[in-house]
Image (spheres, rainbow, N blue to C red):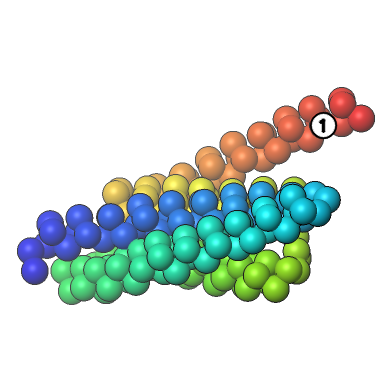
């Protein structure tokens, strides 16, 4: 298969995978918040969120992961690992992303059994994790240097800390 077609399919897989990961946790947040509603609204919302979560997870997120992994593995034949140290950082970030993916799957199964293991506040924080990984992976892959990927991650982390501190101060002012 042509390298550029393979690379395009890889990027399509990545975009769809991240879209699924971003949206699934957003659904988890709504699911957790719906659990506090009185019946019959609670039951109706929970069943709808379970359906949406299941369709997103198995219809988009998993297939996108598989497409990303298959095309990424195929793209490796075009790169020498010895001459591409940036790939090791990308693999490390990918390992973290896969861990996140499987944690989301665990949350999905818990919510399907009517267990809400995390509050909506904690889920909101969890929803930021793939942003860091996306920034690190993209900067590393585009620049093909370890340093740029690490600087991008550090910049993203500093920005996130500033935003969290801002919102915590704002919340404390409302108390």
- When the figure is inspected, residue 76 is found, relative to residue 147, above or below; the finding is below
Residue at image coords 54%, 42%: 156
Left or right side of 95 for 26: right
Give the residue at mark 1.
171
Closer to the camera, 71 or 27?
27
Please state the horizontal and vertical placement of residue 126, each as a whole percent of the image.
64, 54
Q: Quadrant of residue 88?
A: bottom left
Task: Tell whether 152 sits left or right of 108.
Answer: left
Residue 10, by quadrant, is bottom left
User: What residue is shown at x 30% (from left), y 68% (from top)?
Assistant: 67
| Residue 36 visible, this angle | no
Q: Secondary structure at mark 1?
A: helix
Could you say where residue 105 lies in the image, as x and y percent from the top left? 57, 70
Q: Nearer the viewer, residue 70 or 132?
A: 70
Q: Nearer the viewer, residue 37 or 120?
A: 37
Question: Can you give x and y, in whole percent of width and height, for residue 79 in the image?
Answer: 20, 68
Up-down relation of residue 141 to residue 116 (above or below): above
Q: Is residue 97 left or right of residue 74?
A: right
């Amino acid at each position: 298969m042509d390298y550029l077609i393979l690379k395009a399919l890889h990027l399509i897989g990545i975009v769809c995978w991240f879209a699924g990961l971003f949206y699934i946790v957003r659904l988890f947040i709504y699911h957790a918040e719906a659990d506090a509603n009185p019946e019959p609204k609670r039951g109706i919302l929970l069943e709808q969120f379970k359906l949406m979560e299941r369709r997103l997870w198995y219809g988009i997120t998993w297939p996108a992961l598989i497409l990303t992994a298959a095309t990424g593995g195929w793209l490796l034949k075009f790169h020498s690992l010895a001459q591409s140290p940036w790939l090791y950082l990308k693999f490390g970030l990918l390992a973290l992303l896969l861990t996140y993916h499987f944690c989301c799957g665990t949350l999905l199964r818990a919510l399907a059994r009517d267990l809400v293991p995390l509050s909506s506040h904690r889920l909101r924080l969890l929803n930021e994790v793939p942003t860091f990984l996306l920034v690190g992976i993209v900067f590393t892959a585009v620049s093909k240097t370890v340093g740029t990927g690490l600087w991008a991650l550090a910049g993203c982390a500093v920005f996130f800390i500033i935003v969290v501190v801002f919102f915590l101060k704002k919340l404390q002012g409302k108390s």
